Image (cartoon, rainbow, N blue to C red):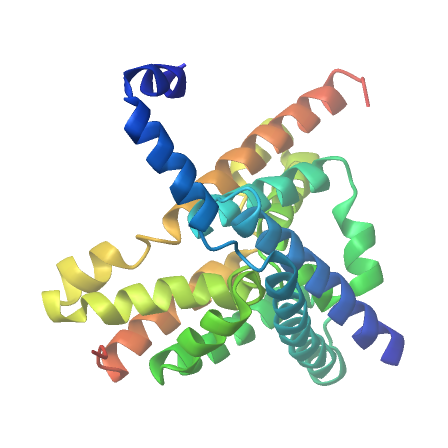
Amino acid sequence: MLAMFFWAFVIGGLICVIGQLLFDVAKLTPGHTLSLLVVAGAVLDGFGLYEPLVDFAGAGATIPITSFGSSLVHGALQDAEAHGIIGVLTGMFQVTSSGISAAIVFGFIGALIFKPKG
Amino acid sequence: MESKQKKQNTTLQQRNYQQLQQKHEIKRPVLKNCIKAFFVGGFICLIGQAVSYFYIYFFNFTEQSVGNPTVATMVFFSMLLTGFGVYDRIGQFGGAGSAVPVTGFGNAVISAAIEHRTEGFVLGVGGNMFKLAGSVILFGVFSAFVVALVKTLLVIWGVL
């Protein structure tokens, strides 16, 4: 269990370093960087490489935004296996539903509770 | 092509000035930023791992399915930190370390929602909520669609 915490820290940190390098060296904006990482996650999952990373690093792989792309592909492929080609659309948000729902719900609650600063 | 044209159109003085500007431009402390990003990002994932174990032990999730509730919880934390103005400070220190984890995605949505509250709930909050995070969703969904479609077709045609 301790090893899992260690690898979550290291792998999560390394993915953030990749993001920082895209900021500083490639001089991309945060929007471009995050989009690129999401696409990278989707492509990695297409080759079946993201799931071993999740097994290995736990939250170190599920917390960075790359996991968003990976779980989109994952859901789509799961449903495609069961229902054929239409499953690509029906399964898309199956695995990653909570991230989007949580962002919408808590975003609205936040807007209700908090006042803008400055 | 465009930069070539630009170069031709500049006078000698302008070129000299550009060289001077380049010489005095403050270099970004790349290594320092990377170390900061590593520790801040790693720390956020460490908290995420603790939340994951919480869900595994008390709510019967498996190691594979636990990512879903963990992400939702992290977005909730990110709402609190954004609302109290703490996440901005973490972001200034951690750079990509705070932007790349899903809490950064949450922060982008929630801060946009709070910021545009004065324009009303429908046009302000509703219309601007995904202003920053929309590109992540668009490119994520589109690339996932292409990847999953290609893979499914390859399986159907018996290539894989």
Residue located 35% across and 53% down the image: B132
Give the side of residue B99 with respect to residue A46, left or right.
left
Q: Nearer the viewer, residue B136 or A72?
A: B136
Q: In percent of the image, x 34 and y 36: which residue is there?
A: B17
Q: Answer above or below: position of A36 versus A98.
A: above
Q: How many marks?
A: 0
Residue at the extreme left: B119
Q: Whole-percent x and y of residue A32?
A: 46, 43
In the image, residue B88 above or below residue B65: below
Residue B64 makes an appearance in the image: no
- State the image coordinates of residue A77 (x, y, percent, origin top left): 67, 38
Residue B47 appearing in the image = yes
Counting from the top left corner in percent of width and height, residue A118 is at 20, 78
> On the rendered image, what quadrant is the N terminus of chain B found in?
top left
Residue shown at 54%/74% (left/top)?
B74
Give the image location of residue A43, x and y in percent: 66, 36
Q: Nearer the viewer, residue B43 or B6?
A: B6
In this view, the residue in front, A73 or B104, is: B104
Query: Residue B125 sits in which quadrant?
Result: bottom left
Apparent side of residue A87 relative to residue B107 in the rendered image (left or right): right
In the rendered image, the quadrant that contains the C terminus of chain B is top right
Question: From the viewer's perspective, is residue A60 above or below residue A40?
Answer: below
